[in-house]
Amino acid sequence: MIVPLLSLPPEAIEQLLDAAFGEDRHGRTAYAIRQGAAWLPRLSFGLVDDAGALIGTLQSWPVALTMDSGEQQPLIMIGPVAVQPAFQRGGHGRALMDAVVAAARAQATEPLMMIGDPEYYGRFWGFCADGTAGWDAPGPFDPRRLLALSVDGRAIGGNGMLGPRIPARA
Ligand SMILES: CC(C)(COP(=O)(O)OP(=O)(O)OC[C@H]1O[C@@H](n2cnc3c(N)ncnc32)[C@H](O)[C@@H]1OP(=O)(O)O)[C@@H](O)C(=O)NCCC(=O)NCCS
């Protein structure tokens, strides 16, 4: 069953992420892109079994592409998407991603982006690297794994650096 991530204990989420990615996961480029941001409750989900045990998690974050002009193009970063190793390849990752893409479309959010396998995220949801060729990140990444998906027809492109969103000055 898919539930809001906010309904789950933070320690259980962290344990699952350690199991799926290893405890050295915090040095990954994806973490640097969203550094200091808080995940978005309306676009973050957990997947629990009938006994309430946590099987999978998906978090979404407010990030932005900062262009040379200093202007920011807001984006939503998806990830990590993680399924308990013993339950992988059982459709759970797909269910979590279906939930976030449907929620993002319903909310007409900013474009979604992630670092992930195009063979998976392209196949089911249409994420692709076509519009991200001009994007840079604060750490190493494979350009073919820097993926984006527009949920409301907004164009994806531009040149700049990915990072946290800076709130506009009043
Ligand atoms: C990647 C992950 C989220 C996928 O979730 P899952 O529940 O294991 O996979 P699903 O059951 O949704 O997979 C559906 C299909 O996609 C395929 N698939 C799964 N992961 C894939 C990948 N990384 N690349 C290509 N295909 C993949 C499956 O084989 C399956 O194919 P089939 O329908 O032809 O049998 C999960 O395996 C995981 O947590 N892995 C470790 C952490 C990770 O790498 N996360 C992604 C980076 S953000």
Image (cartoon, rainbow, N blue to C red):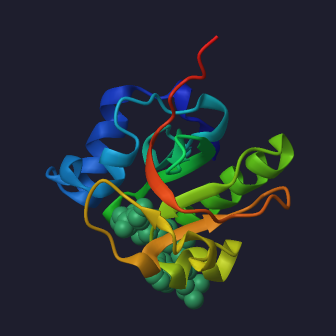
State whether residue 167 is above or below residue 39: above
Position of the C terminus by quadrant? top right
Residue extending farthest to the top is 170
**Residue placed at 62% from the left, 72% from the top?**
131
State whether residue 50 is above or below residue 153: above
In the picture, measured across the screen, residue 153 lies left or right of residue 16, that is: right
**Residue placed at 26% from the left, 41% from the top?**
15
Residue 109 placement (x, y as % from top left): 75, 44
Viewer-proximal residue, 13 or 100? 100
Viewer-proximal residue, 162 or 59? 162
Residue 62 placement (x, y as % from top left): 55, 37
Q: Give the quadrant of residue 111.
A: bottom right
In the picture, measured across the screen, residue 151 lies left or right of residue 31, that is: right
**Residue placed at 36% from the left, 29% from the top?**
36
Viewer-proximal residue, 104 or 62? 62
Residue 26 placement (x, y as % from top left): 22, 46
How many marks can you see?
0
Residue 48 shows in this picture = no
Residue 108 placement (x, y as % from top left): 83, 45
**Residue placed at 50% from the left, 28% from the top?**
166
Q: Give the quadrant of residue 152.
A: bottom right
Residue extending farthest to the left is 24
Residue extending farthest to the front is 69
In the picture, measured across the screen, residue 141 lies left or right of residue 27, that is: right
Residue 152 shows in this picture = yes
